[in-house]
Amino acid sequence: MRSKLVVGNWKMNGSRAANATLLSGIVEGIDGAKAACAVCVPAPYLFQCEQLLQGSPVAWGAQDVSCQAPGAFTGEVCAAMLADFGCRYVIVGHSERRAYHGESNELVARKAQAALAAGLTPIVCVGETLAEREEGATAAIVGAQLDAVLELIGKEAVAQIVVAYEPVWAIGTGKTATPEMAQEVHAGLRAQLRTCNAEAADGVKILYGGSMKPDNARELMAQPDIDGGLIGGAALKAADFLAIIRAA
Ligand code: 13P
């Protein structure tokens, strides 16, 4: 059986003081939790995570990465830098980056490849908008998003990624996919992974994200192909984040 993973995506939130309180609250409350967990924080706070989380069961990571190797790319952060600060994970292809920064499926794939090359685990986000769901295009949209990544990284790397299904209409809206709706998409994603690499597919974690909270986490994560959560708002409060980890 796959073990569960709960990842907090802080998005563009935090301050050194607030982070210290949040991280120490998580570390103090995490004892005995069976699920693995991580926080993906804004890049300026990676050093703080390394200092406060080193040796704890809480891993850390970033929310984006450049597809480029070090060089003249003003404002970018490369995968080797994230590895240098002890990151285990990096989110790639979050819908907010696709929407506000025009990231294409191909660029997201290159970011995943750069992360893998630096020894990081990319958390590859896929998800449809409300209009796409209403058109019945969900499977095609998320399929194309995942396909671009699988095609570039190749069969051998399938075991090294985490996938996150985040329906865009459920992010930050309080509207969650029902467990059945999410399971259907997750099962489709797993089938796609299987087509690429049959041996690896059953071991790949597929997280659900989009208004996951302490009161709906258990039901969602009880589905056979939902292997954890990618948590936005509820990851900013230690008690809520810990409750979701316990539910997992
Ligand atoms: P919310 O949990 O705030 O809906 O955000 C989900 C998300 O986008 C995580 O990456």
Image (tube, rainbow, N blue to C red):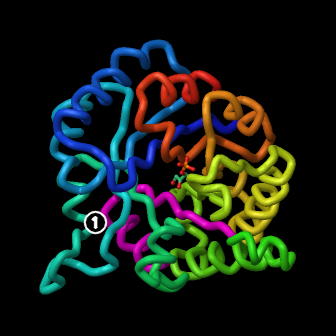
- Residue drawn at x 81%, y 44% is 179
Q: Is residue 185 magenta?
A: no
- On the image, the x and y values in percent for residue 3 come to 62, 34
Q: Give the SS element for disc 1.
A: helix
> Is residue 196 visible to us here?
yes
Q: Decide if residue 170 is on the left or right side of residue 234.
A: right
> Is 125 a magenta residue?
yes
Q: Position of residue 116 (x, y in %)?
A: 40, 65
Pick the residue in front: 138 or 67. 138
Left/right of residue 231 with respect to residue 144 in the rendered view: left
* Residue tagged 1: 79
Query: Considering only vertical position in the picture, is 33 above or below 151?
Result: above
Vertical position of residue 144 compared to residue 57: above or below: below
Residue 73 at x, y percent in the picture = 18, 83
Give the residue at x 81% y 63%.
188
Q: Residue furthest front?
A: 173
Q: Amino acid at mark 1?
A: Ala
In which quadrant will I find the N terminus?
A: top right
Quadrant position of residue 43: bottom left
The residue drawn where x is 44% and y is 77% is 100
Q: For label 1, count other residues whose C-alpha is less than 10 Å away and answer few (under 14), some (14-19) or many (20+).
A: many
Q: Does the rendering let one see residue 207?
A: no
Instruction: Tell me which residue sits at (39%, 54%) in the image.
Output: 11
* Segment colored magenta: 109-128
For the C terminus, the image quarter is top right
Residue 58 placement (x, y as % from top left): 37, 32
Q: Residue 212 lies in what quarter of the image? A: top right
How many numbered marks, from 0 up?
Answer: 1
Q: Is residue 168 above or below residue 177?
A: below
